[in-house]
Image: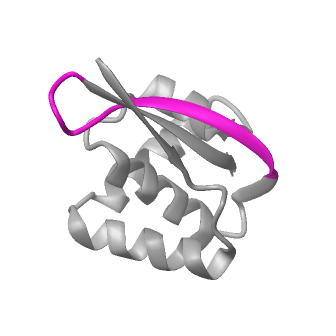
Amino acid sequence: PTFEAVDLTALDATDLEAELDELARQFFVDEAFLADRVDLALEARAAIALPDLIELYPVTKGLPEVVAYISLATQSERHSVDTSTIDWVEIAGLAKHSELQLKLPRIVFSR
């Protein structure tokens, strides 16, 4: 597979929000479905980091799905985005046999 790195940690909050909105418009991702996944994951634990959530529920819609998770995290006071901690996540890209390596701020979903 080919790898492409995507760094979402280098943007300030306003630019990140604009970038997330643009990506969300390009592809439809059902945020309610993803929110349900977060809630299901939180039934068994008080909190879950995005990499663990993605391991539990593998990404099927590429980067836009990860962006939707980040968007969910920024919309609720229960969840946190820690820009001082970096997580690396590998997901399948939309192109056949491609992988994306995502450099993300630490996203934690909490009950």
Display colour scheme: one colour
Vertically, is 16 above or below 108? below
Q: Which residue is at the far right?
A: 84
Residue 65 versus residue 102: which sits nearer the camera? Answer: 102
Q: Which residue is at the far top?
A: 1
Q: Main secondary structure of the magenta part?
A: strand
The answer to if 87 sits in the magenta stretch is: yes
- Residue 48, by quadrant, is top right
Where residue 13 appears, as percent x and y from the top left, is 67, 75
The answer to if 22 sits in the magenta stretch is: no
Q: Left or right: where does residue 111 sit relative to residue 6?
A: right
Where residue 65 appears, as percent x and y from the top left, is 36, 50
Q: Left or right: where does residue 45 sit relative to residue 23?
A: right
| Residue pictured at 72% horizontal, 58% vertical | 81
Residue 7 versus residue 60: which sits nearer the camera? Answer: 7
Vertically, is 101 above or below 20? above
Report the number of numbered marks: 0
- The residue stretch that appears in magenta: 84-97
The answer to whether residue 107 shows anywhere in this view is no
| Residue pictured at 69% horizontal, 58% vertical | 79
The answer to whether residue 55 shows anywhere in this view is yes
| Residue pictured at 34% horizontal, 66% vertical | 23
